[in-house]
Image (cartoon, grey):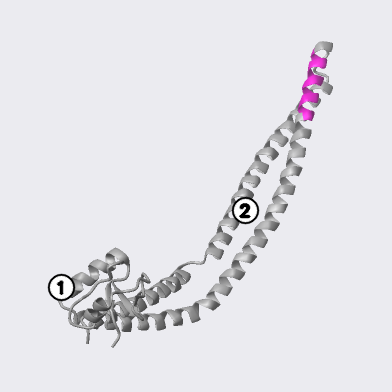
Amino acid sequence: MSASQPLYELQQAETRLDAERADLHRIEQRLASSPEIDRSRASLGRVATQLAESRAALRRVEAKAEDAAAKVKKFTDTLYGGAIHDSREMASMESEISHARTLQSQLEDEEIELMEKIEALESEHTSEAAKLASLESQRAESLEPLAREQAAKVEVVTDLQRERDEAAARLTPAQLATYQRLRDRTGHAVSRVDDGICEWCRVQLPPKDIQHARGEALVTCTNCGRILFVEA
């Protein structure tokens, strides 16, 4: 067995382990949250906020409209109650009544607009709430098989981690340090030799390097610097 074979076996185990861990991470993310449900909840929250604000605005306008109506009644009662006889005072009171009635009319128009807006928001809120409930129901149904998939993936990762640790244990501390340094720097420490070519960088290798790589010394590619592995 060449010196590089245990390093290549370690790399193969780590590559499979990384892929399975990435799959497990994606499953865990799907179990933890749903972007579609998050967006639906955010949309429902925005509608709920707009609805609450519109209802509060309607209450304020209604109070102002009631106040304007009360002023119209008060001024009208005063004008026609016989307490005012001076023509200038009567003209001033009529002006006050006109102003109050104009304000009352404007406020009543505002009330109608707000009530129409609230009606539309209530309909939208009902629709968004139904959509969210449907999404949450569908998600609940999908979680069970996803949880089973997670459990199966955890077993695979555990087995691959054991395989990786066993492969690492077959290396000397110096070999492991060299391997880890190259892996940290390039992502892949070992490159298989395929028909005289470094599989990683696709450079034609000198025959002497290939021959030495079959032996007990670690030989690196003169181009990419990775450890060369030649299959027996």
On screen, residue 100 above or below 223 = above
Of helix, strand and loop, which one carries label 1? Answer: helix
Query: How many numbered marks does the figure carry?
Result: 2
Q: Is residue 140 left or right of residue 12?
A: right
Magenta stretch: helix, strand or loop mostly:
helix
Q: Is residue 214 left or right of residue 197?
A: left
On screen, residue 228 above or below 127 = below
From the image, tell me which residue sits under label 2: 47
Q: Is residue 231 left or right of residue 124?
A: left
Label 2 vs label 1: CA separation?
Answer: 63 Å
Q: What residue is drawn where x is 61% and y is 70%?
A: 134
Residue 10 spot, x, y in % from top left:
27, 79
Q: Looking at the image, can residue 138 be seen? A: yes
On screen, residue 11 above or below 86 = below
Q: Is residue 128 left or right of residue 209?
A: right
The range drawn in magenta is: 89-102
From the image, tell me which residue sits under label 1: 174
Instruction: Choose between 174 and 47: the one closer to the eye.
Output: 174
Q: Looking at the image, can residue 86 be seen? A: no
Residue 62 spot, x, y in % from top left:
70, 40
Q: What residue is drawn where x is 24% and y is 81%?
A: 211
What's the residue type where badge 2 is placed? Answer: Val
Residue 125 spot, x, y in % from top left:
65, 58
Instruction: Choose between 149 and 110: the one closer to the eye.
Output: 149
Q: Nearer the viewer, mark 2 or mark 1?
A: 1
